[in-house]
Amino acid sequence: MVMRSTLFFSLAILFFFFFRIAQCGIEDRGSTLQILHVDSKLTPKSPLISWERSVIQMQSKDNARLRYLAPIASGRSITQNPTYIVRAKMGTPAQTLLMALDTSNDAALVPCAGCVGCSSSSTFDPSLSSSFKPLACGAPQCSQVPNPSCGGTTCGYSTTYGNSVVSATLAQDNITLATDSVLAYTFSCIRNSTGTSLPAQGLLGLGRGPLSLVTQSSSLYQSVFSYCLPSYKSSNFTGSLRLGPNSQPIRIKTSPLLRNPRRSSLYYVNLTAIRVARTVVNIPPSAFAFNTTTGAGTVFDSGTVFTSLVKPAYTAVRDEFRRKMGNATISTLGGFDTCYNVPVTVPTITFMFSGMNVTLPQDNFLIRSSTGTTSCLAMAAAPDNVNSVLNVIASFQQQNHRVLIDVSNSKLGVAREACS
Ligand SMILES: *[C@@H]1O[C@H](CO)[C@@H](O)[C@H](O)[C@H]1NC(C)=O
Ligand SMILES: *[C@@H]1O[C@H](CO)[C@@H](O)[C@H](O)[C@H]1NC(C)=O
Ligand SMILES: *[C@@H]1O[C@H](CO)[C@@H](O)[C@H](O)[C@H]1NC(C)=O
Ligand SMILES: *[C@@H]1O[C@H](CO)[C@@H](O)[C@H](O)[C@H]1NC(C)=O
Ligand SMILES: *[C@@H]1O[C@H](CO)[C@@H](O)[C@H](O)[C@H]1NC(C)=O
Ligand SMILES: *[C@@H]1O[C@H](CO)[C@@H](O)[C@H](O)[C@H]1NC(C)=O
Ligand SMILES: *[C@@H]1O[C@H](CO)[C@@H](O)[C@H](O)[C@H]1NC(C)=O
């Protein structure tokens, strides 16, 4: 009897912790932050139509983002639709903010109190922070933002963000991520915003350019970070963002990072081939060639959902995939052209980078309806316009992997990890 109640009690504790973890995710501690998925209810129990609609919605957001990510888009626009958020504290005393992660942007965009048109319920109030400091026009950081306007004495600027136009002033304050503080962190205090693209949360830029968190905290973190994105299927579990060289995976396959001075935020790598099952797909090398002038090449991005390959690469991979599927009957869904309405088992897909082969589990390239009756190859061809030269390894393909970015040693690593 005693034993039984002890067992019951242990199980109760176990369940208590399990559900606490399930609900809250891991706590932010050390230099590790939890990552929450902003709309993780992708695979609803509801009818197929809503699944289809959510897939199509995500694709249309991707198309908008790809326009901005794309190398020869005019202006130094920031991108849109980051999907993952972390908790940060800013100012003295600290104000808690939720910020959307974006590995392809440098700027931190923070909706500030009194912002006209910001949709956020939580804003940062500079007047309540004793360490807040607006930056003057002459500050060197002011020359790093697009179109600075120095009507007053402070550095103001305006930029587009998808269909939004954002006006902000450049300022500094302490930011605390998990338990580490970055003093006098330069960020953009949003004063007004029109349009619908700006995410309600602020934006935390983890790109590699001068104004990004990675660069500004380099003495603390040596420009090293890693993240594990939670699965689209899990609504409660969370991933993690780990800042600095400590507690990073030791055994991890890596590929050299490539630097494009004209696209200074982006993490380029050298994708050299793609394998479907054992077949290395016949793709012209030009589809993968890195070119700093045109911006062509391959980047890792957390804000695009579905991997996008330049047309000849996508077509070749898709055709090989279809062949391996024994020419089963194909349907389409939104921008996906290779869907099956019967349960399928599929070949593996391997991205081959310089020095690193990444073989993806099915969940990283097949999007399935909750009923299991429709599955689509979750990749697409790059938009067929001037912006058609960039391959983007996107978040659907990264979920449940740890992606390590080590700017100091110029490498990017990928390892499987069940982060949600
Ligand atoms: C914030 O930064 C200022 C210097 O800019 C420093 O004096 C202060 O102690 C910092 N506050 C916190 C909470 O770290
Ligand atoms: C937003 O800010 C800009 C620059 O300060 C200004 O020109 C514009 O009128 C503002 N828009 C709104 C809606 O307040
Ligand atoms: C997620 O959490 C909500 C409420 O906290 C709960 O109702 C739901 O069952 C959970 N879902 C999963 C998949 O654990
Ligand atoms: C990418 O890899 C290919 C094949 O190994 C090589 O020919 C090419 O020079 C590499 N490109 C860069 C930019 O390193
Ligand atoms: C990059 O693209 C430009 C324009 O198409 C071309 O002229 C140049 O030769 C390319 N550079 C390399 C290294 O391939
Ligand atoms: C698929 O179709 C192609 C050409 O239509 C044919 O050559 C091939 O044998 C078919 N594969 C299978 C497994 O049926
Ligand atoms: C990647 O796989 C290919 C076989 O398809 C192999 O030849 C190559 O050595 C592998 N590369 C690495 C870095 O393991």
Image (cartoon, helix red, strand yellow):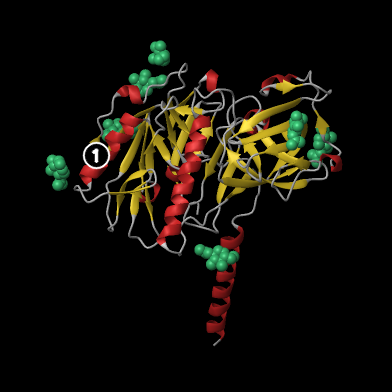
Q: Position of residue 298 (x, y in %)?
A: 43, 29
* Residue under the point 27% across and 34% down: 316
Q: Is residue 282 above or below residue 241?
A: above
Tell me the crowding category of disc 1: few under 14, some 14 to 19, or many 20 or more residues within 10 angstroms, Cα based. Answer: some
148 vs 105, left or right, is right
**Residue holding disc 1:** 320
Q: From the Cβ of disc 1, is ligand 6 less than 8 Å away?
A: no
Question: Can you give x and y, in whole percent of width and height, for residue 13 in the image?
Answer: 59, 71
- Identify the image quadrant of residue 217: top right
Location of residue 391 (image quadrant):
top left
In this view, the residue in front, 232 or 181, is 232
Which residue: 21% across, 50% down? 328
- Amino acid on which the number 1 mark rests in the picture: Glu
- Quadrant of ligand 5: it is top left
Residue 255 vertical position relative to residue 100 in the rendered view, above or below? above
Q: Is residue 24 left or right of residue 326?
A: right
Q: Would residue 149 appear left or right of 20 to someone viewing this image?
A: right
Q: Work out whether residue 369 or residue 171 is closer to the camera in this orientation and state it.
A: 369
**Residue 219, picture quadrant:** top right
SS for dot 1: helix
Q: How many marks?
A: 1
Frontmost residue, 165 versus 327: 165
Question: Would residue 66 be seen by someone viewing this image from the given angle?
Answer: yes
Left or right: 349 with respect to 49? left
- Image quarter of the N terminus: bottom right
Q: Nearer the viewer, residue 69 or 196?
A: 196
From what the image shows, is residue 142 above or below residue 248?
above
Which residue lies at the image location 54% right of the left edge and 82% below the top edge? 3
Counting from the top left corner in percent of width and height, residue 181 is at: 73, 39
Residue 187 appears in view: no
